[in-house]
Amino acid sequence: MRQAGRYLPEYRKVRAGAGSFLELCYNPAAAAEITLQPVTRFALDAAIVFSDILVIPDALGQDVSFREGEGPVLRPVRSEVEIARLRTDGLRDRLQPVYETLRRVRTELAENVALIGFAGAPWTVATYMIEGGTSREFAEAKAWAFRAPESFQHLISLLEEAIGDHLLAQVEAGAEALQIFDSWAGMLPDVAFERWCVEPIRRIASRLAAEAPAIPLIVFPRLAGTRYGAFAEMHGVAAISLDQTVPCRWAAEQLQPHLAVQGNLDPVFLLEGGEAMQAAATHILDALGKGPFVFNLGHGVMQATPPDHVAALCDIVSAWRPHRA
Ligand code: 1CP
């Protein structure tokens, strides 16, 4: 989840002096500083590198920009011809600044704080590339996948390779765990979920298991509901990240016997703080804290979140102890 970002005044300060959002992502000194900001301020066990899932389409040569208050804007890719124009060679060279950020962070991070690298999943990255930004209905991306699955597969296959390369390069640069964000997995209907969410992630996970076997992989198929189960026994997947709609008791019974789970406080509890947050966090800890578990949010920190609430949540989590039977 996003740890840095606009809720932190020290982030806003670096952001204000750095030009565009993508320039910030490709500025290793600034990106390393932002990555370290939350771990400097709070007692966190891990840092996630400051970057974005949309560096992949940018490195593939698609026009990508981030507009203030509007989010990402991309020149849409909607045909085989436009897929053929994407530049797949030299991707690692264009993403060197991200790897340089990881190298810098690793040298400055305390040894007991893990450094997480990440990428978007093929389906989620494809939705931004096809829709040209964020979406509510995902009609363009879904219509292409349903109407012409063979040509849609070309884009997905190209992304699988680019994302796999990018994740492995992050490991070489010092990432000690990896997370794949499939933020829009839940938008796929049943008949399409296996092909466009599960299978691409399975192929990336098995490549990572072969080429970087010591690095745990966390998968986040957001809003996938009971379909989270598809990842429980997947080769090469060490942990699953739960959005806030997943019932903790279901996850404890169905997922946790197979792999570690991460999650899943609703970010609005963190925004609100106080007793409501304490009760919600304790509910999650009581349900999942006895098995392999990483406490996290169900999605990113909201912009208006008071930093004091994050500090209070860290205290709640570290003070928690399992009840004796
Ligand atoms: O200053 C700003 O306005 C920047 C806001 C911001 C930040 C801090 C964006 C724009 N990206 C990021 C960084 C980011 N994004 C990280 C780094 C970790 C950190 O900051 O602590 C990570 C892991 C992401 C991942 C990401 N980017 C996802 C997957 C997770 C999720 O939120 O579901 C997605 C979908 C994006 C795309 C993106 N980046 C930014 C925006 C506004 C969007 C679009 C979101 C949407 O479609 O609603």
Image (cartoon, helix red, strand yellow):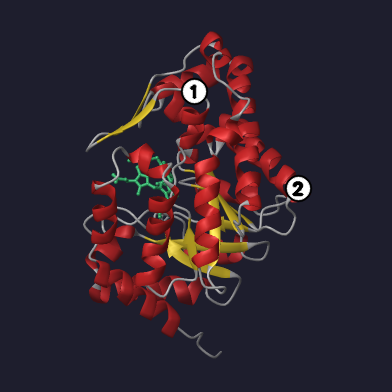
Disc assigned to residue 211:
2
Where is residue 250? Give x, y as percent: 53, 62
Residue 241 seen: no
The kind of residue on which mark 1 rests is: Gly
Where is residue 15? Give x, y as percent: 28, 48
Quadrant in which the C terminus appears: bottom right
Residue under label 1: 61
**Residue sitting at the far front:** 29
Residue at 44% x, 64% y: name it: 296
Q: Nearer the viewer, residue 164 or 125?
A: 164
- Which quadrant of the render holds ligand 1? top left
Quadrant in which the N terminus appears: bottom left
The kind of residue on which mark 2 rests is: Glu
Q: Tag 1, which secondary structure?
A: loop
Residue at 27% x, 60% y: name it: 10
Is residue 275 shown above or below 214?
A: below
**How packed is label 2: few (under 14 Cα within 10 Å), some, or many (20 or more)?**
few
- Tag in front: 2 or 1: 1
Residue at 45% x, 49% y: name it: 28
**How packed is label 1: few (under 14 Cα within 10 Å), some, or many (20 or more)?**
some
Q: Earlier in the sequence, mark 2 or mark 1?
A: 1
Q: Nearer the viewer, residue 12 or 313?
A: 12
- Could you say which quadrant of the image residue 89 lies in? top right
